[in-house]
Image: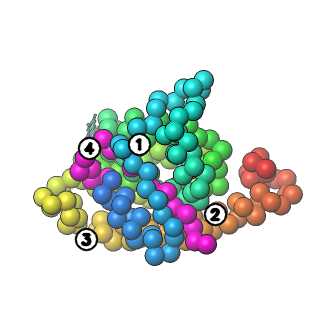
Amino acid sequence: MGLKILGVASSMRESSYSTRVLKLTLEKAKKDAETNLLDLRELQLPMYRPEQNSSPELDKVTEYVKWADAFVLASPDYHGSMSGVMKNFLDFFWSDFAGKTFGYICASHEKGLTVMDQMRTAVRQCYGWSMPYGISVNSDQDFDKQGNITNENILSRIETIARDLVVYGDLIAGQYKKDLQSKEPNTFAAHYR
Ligand SMILES: Cc1cc2nc3c(=O)[nH]c(=O)nc-3n(C[C@H](O)[C@H](O)[C@H](O)COP(=O)(O)O)c2cc1C
């Protein structure tokens, strides 16, 4: 069985650039991994409320999150931060992110570094492992009018992140599963046994 990668799209725009890049990344990863896409624009996850944490949408999302060994989070740059639906999605989960590897995509006019860093911070709080780089795309500088990517560097970066996520995601997931099963006390995985 290959690594299981979940792509999470979080733009509210119909022809979203970040969602488009996410789909291409999953497409590339597919030759060595199983992939699924969760589009938060379509899914309409309710707002996180600790007292009301049951809905068909949440059940579906939870199933996907538990299934995944690795994630690609894709967000537009909204005020230098991730989209509200992405933050809301992250708020529902803690231990399910531990020992899993995360890659990042952002559509921004300003490189989206703060957006990716904020997603990394949330993931780190949940003991997820983040890729040290991400993909940043900038609307009509990187796409033509039909929405095709025109920037060769972006195309190459998509190949790179898809490859690295499979390789490093697999190593981390494999070690995490071993550590969960061992009795060794001083590993971060011991906390999740
Ligand atoms: C509420 C809102 C806030 C935004 N804030 C920023 C911003 O701070 N910096 C920026 O570069 N772009 C900002 N944008 C523009 C979007 O990031 C940009 O259009 C991006 O391409 C949208 O990604 P998408 O195509 O995946 O939806 C903002 C857009 C919206 C709707």
User: Which marked residue is nearer to the observer: mark 4 or mark 1?
Assistant: 1
Amino acid type of disc 1? Answer: Leu
Instruction: Say above or below: 163 vs 105.
Output: below
Q: Residue at x 47, y 44 (%)?
A: 119
Determine whether the residue tagged by mark 3 lies in a helix, strand or loop: helix
The x and y percentages for residue 34 are: 51, 67
Instruction: Say above or below: 132 vs 77.
Output: below
Amino acid type of disc 4? Answer: Arg
Of the numbered discs 2 and 3, the one sitting upstream in the chain is: 3
Q: Does the magenta run of residues contain 4?
A: yes
- Which residue bears the numbered disc 2? 172
Whether residue 119 sits left or right of residue 171 in the image: it is left
Determine whether the residue tagged by mark 4 lies in a helix, strand or loop: loop
Q: Residue at x 34, y 65 (%)?
A: 24
Determine whether the residue tagged by mark 2 lies in a helix, strand or loop: helix
Residue extending farthest front: 56
Q: Is mark 4 within 8 Å of ligand 1?
A: yes
Amino acid type of disc 3? Answer: Glu
- Which residue bears the numbered disc 3? 152
Q: Is mark 3 within 8 Å of ligand 1?
A: no
Q: Start and end of the magenta stretch?
A: 1-18
**Quarter of the picture holding the N terminus:** bottom right
Asked if marks 3 and 4 touch (Cβ < 8 Å), the reply is no
- Which residue bears the numbered disc 4? 13
Amino acid type of disc 2? Answer: Ile
Q: Residue at x 64, y 62 (%)?
A: 173
Q: Calculate the distance from the C-alpha at mark 4 to the C-alpha at mark 1.
A: 14 Å
Q: Is residue 103 visible?
A: no
Q: Does the magenta run of residues contain 123?
A: no
The x and y percentages for residue 8 are: 44, 51
